[in-house]
Image: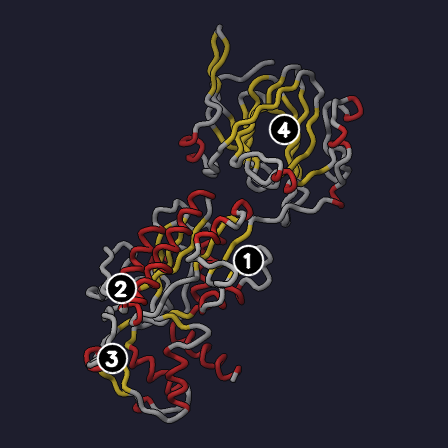
Amino acid sequence: MTIEFSKKLAAHPTAIPGVVVYDLPVHGDNRGWFKENWQREKMLALGLPDFGPVQNNISFNEKAGTTRGIHAEPWDKFISVATGRIFGAWVDLREGPSFGSVFTAELDPSQAIFIPRGVGNAFQTLEDNTAYTYLVNDHWSADAQGQYTFLNLADESAAIQWPIPLEQAELSDKDKAHPRLADVVPMPAKKTLVVGANGQLGKALRALYAENASVEFAGRAEFDVTNPEAFTARNWKNYSTVINAAAYTAVDAAETPEGRIAAWSNNVTAVAHLAKTAVEHDLTLVHVSSDYVFDGSLAIHSEDEPLSPLGVYGQTKAAGDAVVSTVPRHYILRTSWVIGEGNNFVRTMASLAARGIEPSVVNDQIGRLTFTDDIAAGIRHLLDTGADYGTYNLTNDGEPQSWADIAKDVYALAGGSRDAVTGVSTAEYFKGKEAAPRPLNSVLDLSKIKASGFAPRAARDGLEAYLAQQSATV
């Protein structure tokens, strides 16, 4: 065996998405050779996913011609040759357009290959005493074998040109009996779990992902985020992402003794359970936050503004943000003045307009509406594009308005008079009432989300569409 020494560490993508061959620097002298088989920092710099290996396995093969079957496991693998030489064959057995794609190559100790979950791995030894090593990011178990996907080594559609014909090679009886590609059930993609799926945002996400079988929805009955047992009862190995659409949002009730407990339970303790689960199982956690994490003293709020909540609700949302920010793969979406399916300000104003009532509405709180359809679309955008993890402001766009301005727009769109709405200050409106403190300026800077390629629609357009939809369903 001849090994090429002193190659530069390099990555070579293949025809199968996510499968990458790596050149490994091998240093040799009269005593033998040495290589860095796995070096996380350097590999990540080359674009290798931070896949978190937890187990190292070695397959030793005494004779040339030993052929190991095409097995797709439910975990990622980083494979290299410790000694000897192999002909490797990899077949994409995942659901999707690349199903059935094939890549083959000869590997010696100066090379390695990354194999994502669901891609079938097989090899044939070309030399005696060949050792094939695997770094995997899940612990092997007998139960996991039930999630394997297999392909017959002799499958005609894959048409792998084995250097040593299979009839002359050493195979196991099990590998000989594996199905042809036409009979293979593709390995499904890891799932996305939406918790709080019966709330306003949850319903918008249900509509957006209605045709996507890999997105699973759980209301409180199916997954109670405040119950620790809900987290231990689920097999998180089957998931890649959790979208947290659950929250306690009763701003004024949060100031009561009972409400304070409920707000902290839902917005902090439950979020801590989600964050811990995401870290332990390498999940992406999507979390929805609020303008209430700020005191409203600035005219416009950027993502990196220091947190300064005024009331209990805002304090719990700020604490939840801090918890989620510790998850390596996280998106925090800060919103304001959320409008979706269910009771909300816009529906209330439309109802008052229809009944000819002339309301007094706060005119010194300034912000933008955020329609749940747009939050859902922003979430999908970040996930689909693989945008940088972190915090993003996401509201609808357009000129900031007061609640009174929005109420006047609703009245006009509903066929009423803008003059029917009277503006009053926050202090006047809540005089003599038990109410939580509110930020007066809730305008969020949208530069970052726009730079990611997502363009929120104008709040006015969202309002018109929302009212038209409400009218059509009455």
Quadrant in which the N terminus appears: top right
Considering only order in the chain, which callout, 3 or 1, is on the residue closer to the N terminus? 1
Question: Helix, strand or loop at disc 3?
Answer: loop
Question: Helix, strand or loop at disc 2?
Answer: helix
CA gap, disc 2 and disc 3: 23 Å
CA gap, disc 4 and disc 3: 69 Å
Residue 142 appears in which quarter of the rendering?
top right
In percent of the image, x 53 and y 50: which residue is there? 234
**Could one spot residue 103 in this view of the protein?**
no
Considering only order in the chain, which callout, 3 or 4, is on the residue closer to the N terminus? 4
In this rendering, would 469 be left or right of 73?
left
Q: Type of residue at label 2? A: Val
Q: Type of residue at label 3? A: Asn
CA gap, disc 2 and disc 1: 31 Å
Residue 450 placement (x, y as % from top left): 38, 59
Considering only order in the chain, which callout, 1 or 4, is on the residue closer to the N terminus? 4
Q: In this figure, which residue is indicated by the disc labeled 3?
A: 363
In percent of the image, x 44 and y 61: which residue is there? 245
Q: In this figure, which residue is indicated by the disc labeled 2?
A: 312
Residue 351 appears in which quarter of the rendering?
bottom left
**Could one spot residue 228 in this view of the protein?**
yes
Q: In this figure, which residue is indicated by the disc labeled 1?
A: 216
